[in-house]
Amino acid sequence: MQFSTARAEVAAQLGLDETQSNVTTLINRWLNLSQNDISSSWDWTWLQSRQAIATAIDYTTGTVDLIAGSGTITFSAVIATSQTGRFIQFSSYNDWYEITAHTAGAATATISPVYAQAANATAETFTIRTWYYTFATNVSHVYTARQADSQQYIPLVSAAKRDLFQPFSTATADAPQVLTIWDRDSSGSLQFTPFPWPAKVILIEFRTYLRPTDLSGDTDTPLFPAEFDTIWIEGAVARGYKFLDDDREENTLKYFLLRIERMKLRDNPAIDKSRILQSIDEGGRGNNIIRFPSTFDERIS
């Protein structure tokens, strides 16, 4: 159901005039909140998605000049592609600095924090590395990862667990053995760091769950299948009754939550949810013995 159709339905059920801008704003918010309520209540199959991310190799060509206490660094030659967001390490020290600004084709860049050493450095060799790889902004969480070429699964660990076994490692390899999932960046996107650092470009395939984005355009549609549109409407109407201090809010909300529970039963019911009968199913407790029909082969457990 398109956003405009859903808005008109909610307005009709609540007896509101959707042509008024303040009413339109309210109903839009109720519909988006209802969508969020549904999406966050279960790991729905319709939220499952896939994202493939290519790793980047280190950049080590040329040298760089540094000024003590300065955030500006100068390379011996221009770098064709922007290095903004990557990290740089200078050969004389183990510190890593974030490159906060670099324009493609430029020979200068800005680092953070400023160069911490007391003396200037000239013709330093360096390593520029991608520390953080970013998922699409609509990724809620990640549940599996594998190298696309070899089909090798790669474990996912938290930053705290990684720090226990290998903090600040600079080791490189053809493919990472583990991936660290970090919190979201300033744009709201999840990030990950590989270990060891990839020495060549590889493709990592992720299975993810999406998070819904707020609907805004009249033709926008929610992520869930159309058969559940009436449940979406029900949640928005319940919020409308609450706003209007209407005593129908309680029953409408209960019905909305009940229908979400029924929704779960319709979500991919045949996969990984079949009850597997085992030998214990033939027995009973005390004298209450459960017998299978004669047509059922009891040898199969």
Image (tube, rainbow, N blue to C red):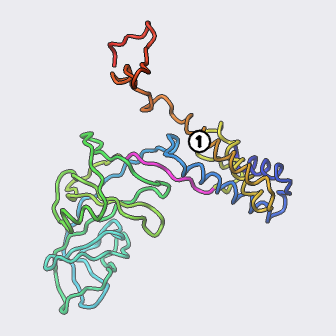
Q: Residues within 10 Å of mark 1 (few under 14, many from 20)?
A: some
Decide which of 131, 284 is in the foreground and name it. Answer: 284
Q: Position of residue 272 (x, y in %)?
A: 42, 32
Residue 287 is situated, as x and y percent measured from the top left of the image, at 41, 20
- Of residues 134 and 163, the one drawn nearer to the viewer in this rendering: 163
Magenta-drawn stretch contains 209: yes
Residue at 27%, 77% in the rendered image: 97
The answer to whether residue 123 is magenta is: no
Q: Residue furthest left?
A: 92
Q: Secondary structure at mark 1?
A: helix
Q: From this viewpoint, which residue is outermost toward the front?
A: 287
Left or right, 212 with reference to 114: right
Where is residue 48? Give x, y as percent. Answer: 47, 43
Q: On screen, 25 above or below 115? A: above
Q: Identify the image quadrant of the C terminus.
A: top left
Where residue 208 sits in the image (x, y, percent)?
Answer: 42, 48
Q: Is residue 271 above or below residue 64?
A: above
Look at the image and give the residue range highlighted in magenta.
206-214
The residue closer to the viewer here, 232 or 296, is 296
Report the number of discs: 1
**Disc 1: which residue:** 261
Q: Residue at x 33, y 80 (%)?
A: 112
Q: Amino acid at mark 1?
A: Glu
What is the quadrant of residue 68 in the picture?
bottom left
Q: Residue at x 31, y 85 (%)?
A: 71
- Quarter of the image for the N terminus: give it: top right
Left or right position of 46 against 165: right
Q: Is residue 234 above or below residue 180?
A: above
Q: Residue at x 26, y 41 (%)?
A: 149
